Image: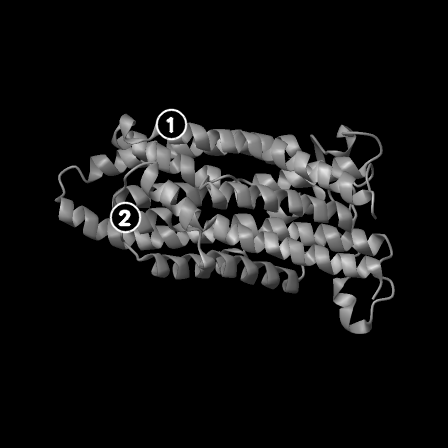
Amino acid sequence: MTSALLLLFVVLLVVLAFEYINGFHDTANAIATVVSTKVLTPRQALLLASSTNLIGAFFGQAVAKTMHSGLIDDKVVAVTTLTILCAMLGGIIWNLITWWFGMPSSSSHALIGGLIGSAMASAPGSWNWQVLIWSRMKMDSKTGLPTGDMEGIFHKVVIPMISSPILGFSIGFIVMGILFFLIRNWRPNSVNSIFGKLQIVSAGYMGFGHGLADAQKTMGIIMLTLFASTKAGELDHLPSWLHFLRITDKSANIPLWIMMTCALTMAAGTYAGGWRIIKTLGHKMVKMKPVHGFAAETTAATILAVTGSLGMPVSTTHTITTSIMGVGAARRWNAIEWSLVERIVWAWVMTIPVTATLAYVIYKFLAMFA
């Protein structure tokens, strides 16, 4: 086995390790509310989340295509397996740090930041901003004509990064206000009983949205890795039973084996659980009952489903956390622990710059020995 092929397998394992960590790091996003409201036990909630994560991963490919062809300009920089390795390491390090401190940071933005930093490190010069696709018209891969859709970091990352938390808070607030109006004359026991059952559905919906949004991101990274290796000629002399690794057209549909691998890895990571973040989201930030959990999960899952269909790699963490904030604010403004919210926001703000810097430094260090 050549050193290039060995490095490729190492990179693929690291990508799947990121997917697994994403599963347990973001488990809280799907199940924190349903656990905190005591509708399901932690083990039941984990089983529900991992199952629906698995299902959601098979719906749509728009986000994956954004990740592998809509952020980095391969005409400026040749993405290599080392580029991907350093991107993943930067994201993994940040995910583990924030997981350790119980902060629900974004795995999506950790991955994007890592990819930005390592791509810039791969290019000639220092911090070469031209490697990034900031804003451009998307072209049809077959006809070469404009599709009318915009792609790039501004449209697919920056705008959703700002708008999804605002939408999460606003829609969560509105949905909770509507529910308060509808149930104002209900008995508390009836409210808890009915919404306890409905929250099982909303938690499953949230797990589905998480699988759809996050599993596609690593699918795109694997496609980018294999396309880069194929283009570099590293896979020219593979034995026949490994020819499935060759990706000659990065705009093609994602192979089933990549979808299966990413979906199963994320589901396994989800089942492993992320109790530190569950405690932060489900208990510390705002106290919830089933009706609040239903409103927050339904809001967040709907936003994830819509943005996923538009190819926007939106943060599951940002979306569910701000939905919980909106629901809590509708209940009572001071029901939210705003000091904790401030810490969470700082973790969000720091994610892309920190992971980009980590990936950049790691690449420069490893390149000295490559």
Q: Of the two numbered discs 1 and 2 on the same chain, state the one appearing first in sequence.
A: 2
- The relative height of residue 183 versus residue 225 in the rendered view (above or below) is above
Q: The residue tagged with tag 1: helix, strand or loop?
A: helix
Give, as a three-letter code, the residue at label 2.
Thr
State left or right for residue 60 relative to residue 89: left
Q: Which mark is residue 362?
A: none
Dot 1: within a 10 Å radius of its alpha carbon, few (fewer than 14), some, or many (20 or more) residues?
few
- The relative height of residue 72 versus residue 85 in the rendered view (above or below) is above
User: Quick check: can you spot residue 251?
Assistant: no
Please state the horizontal and vertical placement of residue 296, each as a whole percent of the image: 35, 41
Q: Which residue is mark 2?
A: 37
Please state the horizontal and vertical placement of residue 218, each as a whole percent of the image: 62, 51
Please state the horizontal and vertical placement of residue 31, each as a whole percent of the image: 38, 51
Give, as a three-letter code, the residue at label 1.
Ser
User: Quick check: can you spot residue 329?
Assistant: yes
The quarter in which the N terminus is drawn is: bottom right
Q: Residue at x 27, y 48 (%)?
A: 37
- The relative height of residue 240 versus residue 112 in the rendered view (above or below) is below
Q: Which residue is mark 1?
A: 339
State left or right for residue 176 relative to residue 17: left
Alpha-carbon distance for marks 1 and 2?
22 Å
State left or right for residue 228 relative to residue 106: right
Closer-to-camera residue (97/229): 97
